[in-house]
Image (cartoon, coloured by chain):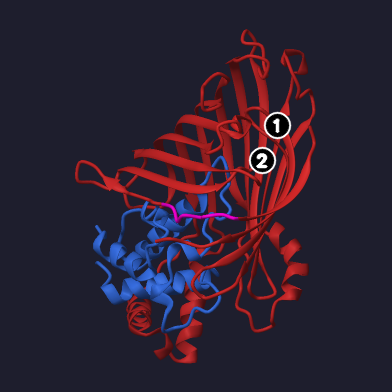
Chain colours: A red, B blue
Amino acid sequence: MKYIFFTLIISFSLSSLVKSQSFSGTNDSTLTYAFDIRQSDNSTNTLGLDFNIRYDIAQLSGPKANSPEGNKLDLSFALAGYQDFVKEATEFDFMTLELNVLGRKYNSKPVSLNPVELIYYKDLLEKSGVDPGSLTPTEQKNLAAFTKKLFNGRQFLSYKLGYKMESNQSLSFNQHMLQAGISLEVPKLHEVFEVFFSETRSSDMNYKAQPIRLYAGLDYILGANGAKEQLVDSTNVVPRARAEMAWRTLLFDNFELRATFESNYFFDEGNLTTTPTNELINFFQAWLVLPVSTDKTKVMLSYAKGKLPPLYTETAAGSIGVSFAIE
Amino acid sequence: MSLSLNQSRGVVYQYFLSEGWLPVGTTTQNWDQVKLGDMGIDDPALPSDPHMQKQRIALDLQRFFVVLGSSVASAKNFLKGKTKTLKELAEWLHQNQA
């Protein structure tokens, strides 16, 4: 069912409570959790609890612990989801459980400093650490050029392989899958968008837009349990391709524009017991964030349209909200 | 050879300045009070990889230290703390050098 509505709400955006816990006296294993009270992605007239709990065991393999170069693997366990406060609004609840091997690849161009250069840049950093404003224009220029040189041509890629369960909160519907995917920052593409958006900013704004982030993955849905919402036949394997994008920029010096896009594609509609059929299933969401004071109070305009897994309930909704942080 | 606390602060300031993360209104006087949650790192999150930019930034900072002759642990998990400041990040990096 398609529906479009706009509402005016006051939503609490409780700042995420993040707890990093080191175990066994090392920084290798970490428990983090975050809770937010927010609107559902699919509906603007209900509030719920967003939760994200992760346990990461870092560096299953790799070279020297503190070296950034090369491939490294981590193990990650994550539980995330959304529980609506309105008992009847269960169609918006979801939960994911994941166990993944997370990998990353990082390569950068070699930069070696001779002893004189090393002392020079360390002295500049010492001076910058005390007061960046005390650097002379030449020192600022040299330090900026050095920093830029360090990260020119840097290559970074993140990848994962693991198990995932998607379900509603009551577990009355759930589907299990093996997943593999890569994510990266796409170079240059954001500069195309920035041709327009940079025109809205003051010429003296020192704003550097971040690259568009992209995820591409393949899921093998092994089966599902559920009633009428059941998406796939429990005896069949259904391959599903997923692509995701996230991006943000600045408009008129102060307004943030954020956007995410997700697309799902099922390769074999013959194995699907209900919609969606063999088509691209998309979900788009955009936010315009307007600061209204210096104490982090913001007005947020958001718009969401499309379908999200696991139930692929279609929605189109806009909202206006006030966000403030409680720390 | 370990970097001093001021050198670690210099690394943090220069890195986030160079990479364009410092929010509007940041000056050379207040930069170390900027909170990690105000810089828009991984915001909005990529649903299937919500901490990708934190991972990359942590690796960049490790590289900065390596080039300067030191080495430091990954700050990825520290970067998840939205209310932490750049001052605290510099102190954490200084204290977690090998």
Whether residue A113 is visible, yes or no, is: no
Q: Dot 2, how many residues are within 10 Å of its Cα: few (below 14), some (14-19), or many (20+)?
A: many
- At a point 55% along the width and 25% down the height, the residue shown is A167
Query: Could you tell me the amino acid type at mark 1?
Result: Thr
Q: Which chain does tag 2 point to?
A: A
Task: Count residues near mark 1 (Cα–Cα under 10 Å), then give few for <14, some for 14-19, many for 20+.
Answer: some
Asked if residue A13 lies in the magenta stretch, the reply is yes
Is B24 or B16 nearer to us in this picture? B24
Q: Is residue A300 magenta?
A: no
Give the residue displayed 56% in from the left and 55% down from the top: B43
List the residue tagged with mark 2. Answer: A42
What SS does tag 1 mark? strand
Image-quadrant location for residue B95: bottom left
Please name the amino acid that badge 2 sits on.
Asn
Marks 1 and 2, the one that precedes in the sequence = 2
| Up/down of A187 relative to A71, above or below | below
Residue A21: x, y in percent? Answer: 28, 46
Specify whether A23 is left or right of A158: left
